[in-house]
Amino acid sequence: MIEMQGVYKTYPNGVTALNGLDVRIQQGEFVYVVGPSGAGKSTFTKLIFREEKPSKGSIHINDLDLAAMKERRIPKLRRNIGVVYQDFRLLPRLTVYENVAFALEVIEERPAEIKTRVMDVLEQVRLKNKARFIPDELSGGEQQRVSIARAIANRPRILIADEPTGNLDPETSWEIMHILEEINQTGTTILMATHNREVVNRVRKRVIAIEDGVIVRDERRGDYGYED
Amino acid sequence: MSVGGITAMKIRTIGRHLREGRKSVFRNGWMTVSAIGATTTTLLLVGVFLAVMLNLNQFANSIENDIEVRVFIERTADESQVEQLGEDIEAINEVASVEYSSKDEELEGLVDSLGDEGKAFELFDQTNPLNDVFVIDPSSPSAADSIASDVRELEFVDEVDYGEEVVQRIFTFNEYARTIGLVLIIGLIFTAIFLISNTVRITIVARRKEIGIMKLVGATNAFIRWPFFIEGMLLGLLGSIIPVAAVTGGYYYLYYHLRDSINFDFVQLLPFNPFIWQLSGLILAIGVFIGIWGSVMSVRKFLKV
């Protein structure tokens, strides 16, 4: 469960990104976070995996109190949260297999476990046959699938996707959505910040709209609601 | 999700860090060469300074320890007065021991020390012009001065001599040599640390993306830091190879060959073995210290979010 109460975030340069945000997301939900650029969507997601600290307010992820959490506990938190970005962030010199395995190696997973787990998640994103390719040899959608595979390799309880379809054509976007839904069905909470009205309107889920740092709309099966 | 082993380092992890650190050293070609070059130069100079300083120290110590205060007794003093003087001297603080040496013994010593030329003094055998002497061994070399001034106050003392000028000069010279040497060594060490930290910083920048992903998926800071730590250590180790070889070779030559051709009788060089092992160990330790400190300095800045 993700719970935020009265969360404010002001950056050192004086920009206020969040202005008293309250939200509660149950385990296993699929949530779209929408809103204009600069509304605070990114800051909202970054607070969850402690890339940013709130200036004020409380954040709880399951039983962890993020405001009181010590610096050295951050790795433990992040092992419970997968993150996917618009620009994939793959290591260009490593193969698909190695990119996914890397995420498990650096948290010191057992080698035997790494092997089976990497192949499992590659199968889940339907890229088992491209395990030996390097990212440059793949299409954008395939690269995003690799980054999703990497994000879920550690079996996180929460998956955060920041504009996962931002760089992809409509057809590829459906592919990604399909995979995210499958992951959601295994009980993983999915939080997806997006500008893709097509996707939000067709695959109806809970929609949280953020404007000027506050939630202006929160609907169980909402639509995108903005004119582009 | 394995959170249990987050702090304890596993054996296979050590292997990984070693591999990554080594890879970095090779991948950064010229930067590595320049960092090693800087370390090599530093350690060469540090090694030579250390060898000179430690020998100077030893030389000064041996001279200092030879310091004795000679008290020339007035020729008019009779036996009981001399005895009283001896007791008074012994009562002075910092006097370790006092020895009486009669004028005949003094003359004998003088004749002996001058060899053939001294034979001329044998003529004085009958009418010895020297004084009887108390030879004081001070408890520490620096106490000679205060002992001398205390003794001058006593009766039946003709003259006190402990080679003030020489002693003072050795003290000052030694002091200067030590200070200058230390300042130079520390300055050089910091230069090398700076150069290594720059090299490692470039390595880090090159791996920024990798580090970002490591942090994202929950690698600990310690895990991220280790390869850089090892890289710094390797740079330091590689930088000490030439200095250790050069200092060892140079000292060997000085100790076993040059020593015979120059008259080094009055300078006792520290014996090659074990001195050279201690010196090499010291150079290696400084090299590793420079490397590790340099790398830790640049990583620390980078890991802070």
Image (cartoon, coloured by chain):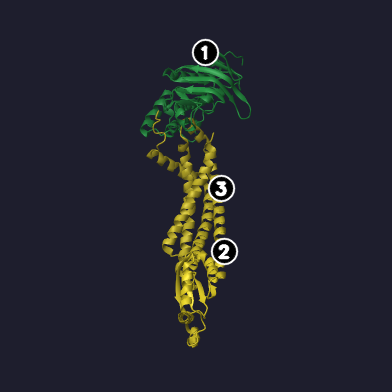
**Chain B shade in the render:** yellow
Q: Is residue A218 above or below residue A37?
A: above
What is the secondary structure assignment of the residue under circle 3?
A: helix
Number of residues whose C-alpha sits closer than 10 Å to that of mark 2, classed few (under 14), some (14–19) or many (20 or more): few
Chain letter for mark 2, please.
B
Chain letter for mark 3, please.
B
- Amino acid on which disc 1 is placed: Arg
Chain letter for mark 1, please.
A
Asked if badges 2 and 1 are on one and the same chain, I answer: no
Where does label 3 land, which residue?
B194
Between residue A126 and residue A137, name the one nearer to us: A126
Residue B172 got which mark? Answer: 2
Residue appearing at x 43%, y 17% in the figure: A185
What is the secondary structure assignment of the residue under circle 2?
A: helix
- Amino acid on which disc 2 is placed: Thr
Where does label 1 land, which residue?
A202
Discs 3/1, front: 3
Q: How many marks?
A: 3
- For marks 2 and 3, the one nearer the N-term is 2
